Image (tube, rainbow, N blue to C red):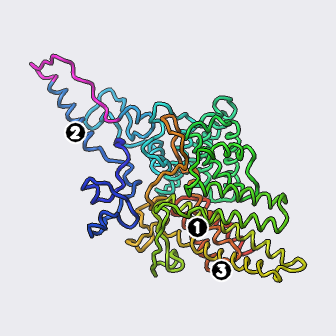
Amino acid sequence: MVYCGPPSKGCQTCREKKVRCDQRPGGCIRCAKARRECPGYRNQSDLMFRNESTEVVRKAKAKAASKSRSASPGFKSSTPPPPPQSPFPEHDRESSLILGRRNDSPNPTPSNSYYSMAPTIDEKATGFFVTNYIINMDRRPGNSAGYRMDDNLSNCMKAVGLAALASAAHAPELVQEAHRRYLSAIKLTNAALGSPVDVKKDSTLLAIMLLSVFETVTSGRQRSLSAWTNHINGAAAVIKVRGPEQLASIGGVRMFMQVTASLTVSCLEVGMALPEHILALNAQITRHADLSDPAWRYYETMMMLTNFRGHVRCGLISNPQEILARALEIDKAALAICANASCVYEYETVYTSADPGVIFAGYYHMYHDYMSASVWNGMRAIRLMLQEIIRDTLLKLHSSRPPFSTNEQYRAQYQASTSTLYQVQSDIIASVPQHLGYSPTKSTSGGVSGHSFPWSPFNSRVVTPLHSLKSNSADPPMIRSLGGYGLPWAIYLAGSVDIATEPVQKWAIGTLQGIGRSMGIQQAIVLADKLNKKNTGV
C-alpha cells in the first residue's frame, strides 16, 4: 500500500467527468444544475489505505520469472539487471506515511515479497492523524526541505493518532499504546524545554499543542481538563520564550494565534485575563491582519471578552455602570463579526420533523464549511457569556436603592438580553445536526459513514486572516489545535445558561455524551457530567 496523495473529495460524478467539484453540503452545484441527484462524497478516512496486494504479487512473480530466465542455459545479458525499484518513495517512508516495510529476508519469493503488506501500528496512527488532524493536507509533515519532524513531535502525532484510532476502530487495546507514546512525548518535551535551542523550535510548540489535543480525545474525567489547561499554559510560556522573532513568518503567527485561541478558552473557564506577554505579541501581528475577515474579528473579540471577564472576576472592574457599558460594547463587536461577510458565511435553515432527539426544535442550519460554522458558534458563545454578565449586573442593580426597575432603560435592556439568550441558544442547538452528519439529502444521523469528527461532514477551507506575510517550505503543518473541543464547549454553554429549560438541558447532556462516544472527544463526556451536576445541584 503506497501513499498516492490526498484522494479527491469530489462526488463520484465530478470525479468521473474529471471536473472540479464544489463539495457543497447536501450535493454539489454541478449536479444541481444538471438536475440529477448528487451521489454524495466519500469518507476520507475510508480512503486512507489502498490495497496494492495484486500489484506487489505481480511484480514479485515478474522478478521470479526474470531470475529463472537469467539462470537458464544459453541466456546471457550484456548489462546487469536493474535493482528492483521500490514503489514506496523514500521521503514518504521517512515521514511514516508509507504503509509497508522492507522485508530483510535474503531469499525473497513470490509468497515472501520484498515488502510486508501489513502496516505497523505506528504507520496506521500517523496516517490517521495526518488524514484527520492536519488541515493543509497538501503539505505533509516531514515532506518539505525546510521543515522536518523530530522524535518529540513524531511521538505526539502517534499518541493522538492512536487515541483517535482506538475510538474509531473500537479498539480499546490501542489506548494503552497511545498512553505509552504520550508519556514518551512528555519526557521528550520536558527535555526540549530544558534546552535553550530546542525550546524555541516550532516542533516543540507543536508538540505541546498536540499534548493538549491528546487530553481532549482520551480522558473522560475531570482531571483531563486540568491536564489540558496545564498544556495550554505551557504552550503560552513557550510563546513568551520564543519572543517576537516567531512572528516573522506566517507559520509562526499561525501557531501563536492557535495557542492564543486555546488559551482564551482556558482563561474563560477559570475567569482569568490573558497574560501580558500574549497581549504584547498580539499587538505586533495586528498590522498583518485582515480586519474585515470574520475569523480575525472573532479572534479579537474572544480576547476582549477574556480580558473583560477576568477583570470583572478579580474586581479590577467593579462599577455596575462600567460593567454594563463594556459588556454592551463587546457585544456590539461580536454582533459585527459576520456582518457584511462573504457568501461562505451564509447558512441555510432546514425544517424537518425527523429525529427530534437531535434536531431539537424541528429545524437545523447548513453551513458552507467548518470554519464558517465555528466562527458563527464562537460568536454565539461570546454573546451568551456577555448577556449573562449583563443580566447578572442588572439584577444587582435591582437590589440597590433605588432599584433598577424604576429605570425604563434597564428594564428594556434586561428583556433584550433575555431574548438574545434564547435566540443565541437556539442557534447553537440548530448548528449541531450538521456536525453529526445531517443534510437535506440525509434525514438520519450518521450521514458520514463510519467514525466521524465534528469537521468531517463539512467542506474544507483553510483561513489565515493575515496579509503581507508569505508561507514557505519551513512552515510547520497546520493542525486542528482544539481537537474538536469547540463544538462541545458551545453545547455546554447553551445548556448551562440560566434560561435553559429542562428539555434543553437534557438534550445538551445527551448530545455531549453522544459526541464523546461517537467522535472520540472524551472531554465532551466531562462537560456532560459537569452540566448534569450543575443542573441537579449535586
x, y (%) of residue 106?
32, 26
Question: Residue 350 location in percent, x, y?
Answer: 45, 75
For the residues marked 1 and 3, what is the alpha-carbon distance in whole angstroms? Answer: 18 Å
- The residue at 34%/63% (across/down) is 28
Q: CA separation, marks 2 and 3? A: 65 Å
Q: Amino acid at mark 1?
A: Gln
Number of disc labels = 3
Q: Earlier in the sequence, mark 1 or mark 3?
A: 3
Q: Residue furthest left?
A: 74
88 or 386: which is nearer to us? 386
Disc number at residue 513?
Answer: 1
Q: Which residues are magenta?
A: 70-88
Q: Position of residue 1 (x, y in %)?
A: 34, 43
Mark 2 or 3: in front is 3
Which residue, given by chain and number where applicable, does mark 3 sit on?
501
Cα distance between the residues tagged 2 and 1: 49 Å
Locate the C terminus by quadrant. bottom right
- Depicted 197 relative to depicted 353: above or below: above
- Disc 2 and disc 3 in contact, CB within 8 angstroms: no
In this rendering, would 117 be left or right of 528? left
Amino acid type of the residue tagged 2 in the rendering: Arg
Task: Residue at 36%, 60% (x, y): give it.
Answer: 41
Q: Is residue 20 visible?
A: yes
SS class of the residue under badge 3?
A: loop
Residue topped by disc 2 = 58
Does dot 2 land on a helix, a strand or a loop? helix
